[in-house]
Image (cartoon, coloured by chain):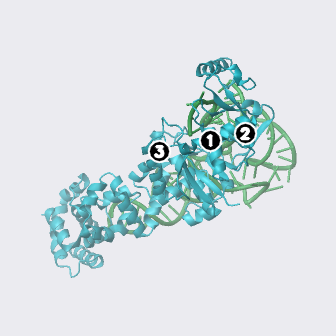
Amino acid sequence: MTVVTRFAPSPTGFLHIGGGRTALFNWLYARKTGGKMLLRIEDTDRQRSTEAAIEAIIDGMRWLGFTWDGEVVYQFARAGRHAEVAHDMLAKGTAYKCFATAEELEAMREAATAEGRPPRYDGRWRDRPASDAPPGAPYAVRLKARQDGETIVEDTVQGRVVFPNKDLDDLVLLRSDGTPTYMLAVVVDDHDMAVTHVVRGVDHLTNAARQTQIYEANGWDVPVFAHIPLIHGSDGAKLSKRHGALGVDAYRAMGYLPAALRNYLARLSWSHGDQEFFSDAEMVSLFTLEAIGKSAARFDMAKLDSVNGHYMRTLPAADILEAFEAALPFMPGGPAFQDKLDESAKARLVAALPGLRERAKTLVELLESARFLVERLELDDKARKILDEGGRERLAAVMTTLRTAPEFTAPALEEAVKAFAETSGTKLGQIAQPLRAALTGRTTSPPIFDVLEVLGREESLARIGANSG
RNA sequence: GCUCCCUUCGUCUAGUGGCCUAGGACACCAGCCUUUCACGUUGGGUACACGGGUUCGAAUCCCGUAGGGAGCGCCA
């Protein structure tokens, strides 16, 4: 039997980081087993579902590099099929019509809460004939759940979890307006789509018990469940916007690499010994649902930065350049940078990339540190200080050396400047720092002789000339 | 309130009765490297929630306590 997983977000917001990891695990497992991953948009809540959210989710999936098999399935479009199953269950007696009004249900919940009981439907229409209801009254269709015994969820991550059936009430399958509930729709869709493994957040664990009852009422095979722990914020509370529950598009704007984010996310509640870095191929071959832990992990930006930094300096330069250019429209200052990136600027960027990527943890940092390549920057405070404190004079002194260097290459310039330093009795740093300040406007940059070479003789001398004297 | 789940350094985690005076990674501190910043490198501190058992021996098994999380809609 080939494995079929699915990622089934509801389009009520962007694809957040927790959803991203759920998608990752589904994707990894499908690829590992040679199976398929399906994408289903759970848009049965018409009020809260939006087209913008659907686009954001699909955009996020693509950016993260996740591919799915077949067309995207829209759950709402299958409402007819869901209703058909509900009516079939009605006919078989595994479901019944419930005429309770919203007010009655509200009163029921209040009474239960007041008495310290869990709020549940009391089953008042379970054994009552529909003829008792006023003619033409609207009704919901409820599952006639077993009231004795227990429902067992055999979960690959959580283990065997037992729910006494008395704690599970008769859930609504079809609303009184005839539309299906999530609970029904998920089961019918997963069954119809031949999903074999349901990998989702542990917040769905009790749903798994209720859904198991629906599978059983229809005589369908129950899929393998794997309920993965949630991701928490740095304070241990549910992830909120304060600490990282941003849409994945926000991570793109912050300059993270998709490969790094995949790697970081994979290591949350999943591990393989002491290994920290995994290529996609390694992740796929090493991943197992059994190796997922049960406890929630906290989202740690510092570690993400570190992982991203590792990818920044180890990925092929061409990949970094590609990711950088792709991220440009989304990063602060990116579009402006893009406008200045003509042929020659791009050539300088390519030449400087090895030195730049080494120092950048994110593409945003890369962008910031590359700006001197495409424009002459205002001096920052530290750079100004270096020039003011004798820097200008020393620059004036090396000008001739630079102007007359036989070759304007890093090794040749290094040799020439070092010779100059020696004969003039100056420490190399006393020349290098003013050069850096004049050339880049900053006090940190790639090695200064590389900077000179990348900028070229003409531009370098112009920038130095403007800051010497 | 009820049901379920969780608990190893600040964080992510290794660990499935002896290999653990608990390992790795991030972060932190100190040193080295060095034209800056990074990278790299050397060293350091910090953890088995608590209390009882079981056992020759427990981070690992059992019980209890505490703390944390999730779920309890005609939302998904």
- The residue lying furthest to the left in this view is A469
User: Can you say which quadrant of the picture contains the C terminus of chain A?
Assistant: bottom left
Residues packed near mark 3 inside 10 Å, few (<14), some (14 to 19) or many (20 plus) = many
Q: Secondary structure at mark 2?
A: helix
User: Can you say which quadrant of the picture contains the N terminus of chain A?
Assistant: bottom right
| Frontmost residue, B39 versus A44 | A44
Q: Is residue A378 above or below residue A108?
A: below
Q: Is residue A263 left or right of residue A417?
A: right
Q: Which residue is mark 1?
A: A82
Closer to the camera: disc 1 or disc 2?
1
Distance in Å between CA atoms under marks 2 and 3: 36 Å
The answer as to whether the residues below labels 2 and 3 share one chain is yes
The answer as to whether the residues below labels 3 and 1 share one chain is yes
Q: Which residue is mark 3?
A: A244
Please name the amino acid that badge 2 sits on.
Gln
Query: Which numbered disc, 3 or 1, marks the residue that appears first in the sequence?
Result: 1
x 65%, y 62%: residue: A33
Query: Which numbered disc, 2 or 3, marks the residue that appears first in the sequence?
Result: 2
Residue A220, position as x, y percentages in the image: 73, 47
Residue A415, position as x, y percentages in the image: 27, 78
Q: Which residue is mark 2?
A: A213
Q: Is residue A100 left or right of residue A444?
A: right
The cyan one among the chains is A
Q: Secondary structure at mark 1?
A: helix
Closer to the camera: disc 3 or disc 1?
1
Chain bearing tag 1 is: A
